[in-house]
């Protein structure tokens, strides 16, 4: 069993705001992967990148994941927090995950345009910048195909409902599939000897 650590504030451990645990995309991911992999959801509802960064070392030590999917930042943006700090926090999480031997995937999120064009565009640019800098796979927008569809969103207009969860998993799946097919450094070293 290979653990996958996943940090996702919009899909907290109980299953997501307004979504039963069994209906959330993380549970759907567990079902899709079957017994071959263990999925660990290390998220906390409403968390920011600063909170994720503070909790990550213990989570890495406890789970020793092969793959870490980072999906944080939405709450930073919704609170109007410093984008430079958000970027720094995400960068540190990528570096810490790699130092722990994990392959990393970055799951991007977007914020509503009412935060102003400059802030919204700067927020959106963080994810591809980090993916390029660290040469890691990116899901540009986790809620692609969900966020603008009222039938797939909860009444708050921010959180997806149960019907949107399979689409979110489909958005993540190509990146995760690529990470699953990439041998870790220990496997690569054994193959080279």
Image (spheres, rainbow, N blue to C red):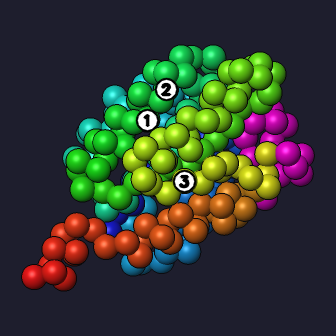
Q: Which residues are magenta?
A: 148-163
Q: Residues within 10 Å of mark 3 (few under 14, many from 20)?
A: many
In this orientation, does residue 144 appear? yes
In this view, the residue farthest toward the left is 193
Q: Are marks 1 and 2 in contact (CB under 8 Å)?
A: yes
From the top left corner, tell me how far across and down residue 174 is, in percent.
58, 68
Q: Secondary structure at mark 2?
A: helix
Q: Main secondary structure of the magenta part?
A: loop
Q: Earlier in the sequence, mark 1 or mark 3?
A: 1
Label number found at residue 132: none
Above or below 18: residue 69: below
Q: Secondary structure at mark 3?
A: strand
Q: Which mark is residue 138?
A: 3
Disc 1 is placed on an element classified as: helix
Which residue occupies 59% across, 60% down? 172
Q: Are marks 1 and 3 in contact (CB under 8 Å)?
A: no
Percent from the top left, x then y, of residue 168?
67, 57
- Magenta span has 86? no
Q: Is residue 8 left or right of residue 180?
A: right
Based on the displayed image, in which of its 4 quarters is residue 119 positioned? top right
Residue 41 visible, this orientation: no
**Nearer to us in this view, 144 or 56:** 144
Q: Position of residue 192 (x, y in %)?
A: 16, 81
Q: Residue at x 61, y 36 (%)?
A: 125
Q: Residue at x 49, y 26 (%)?
A: 86
Measured Cα–Cα span from mark 2 to mark 3: 17 Å
Q: Which circle's residue, 2 or 3, is located before the other in the chain? A: 2
Residue 86: which disc?
2
Q: Quadrant of the C terminus?
A: bottom left
Residue 90, numbered label: 1
Calculate the distance from the C-alpha at mark 1 to the C-alpha at mark 2: 6 Å
Quick one: quadrant of the N terminus?
Answer: bottom left
């Amino acid at each position: 069993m290979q653990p996958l650590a996943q940090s996702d504030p919009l899909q907290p451990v109980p299953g997501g705001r307004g979504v039963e645990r069994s209906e959330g995309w993380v549970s759907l991911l567990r079902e899709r992967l079957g017994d071959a992999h263990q999925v660990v959801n290390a998220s906390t509802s409403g968390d920011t990148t600063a909170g994720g960064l503070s909790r990550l070392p213990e989570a890495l030590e406890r789970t020793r994941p092969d793959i870490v999917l980072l999906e944080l930042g939405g709450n930073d943006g919704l609170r109007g927090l410093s984008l430079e700090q958000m970027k720094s926090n995400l960068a540190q999480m990528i570096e810490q995950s790699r130092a722990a031997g994990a392959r990393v995937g970055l799951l991007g999120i977007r914020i509503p345009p009412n935060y102003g064009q400059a802030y919204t565009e700067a927020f959106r640019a963080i994810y591809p910048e980090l993916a390029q800098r660290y040469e890691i796979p990116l899901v540009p927008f986790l809620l692609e195909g969900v966020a603008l569809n009222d039938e797939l969103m909860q009444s708050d207009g921010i959180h997806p409902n149960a019907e949107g969860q399979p689409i979110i998993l489909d958005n993540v799946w190509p990146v995760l599939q690529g990470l699953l097919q990439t041998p870790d450094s220990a496997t690569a070293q054994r193959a080279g000897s």
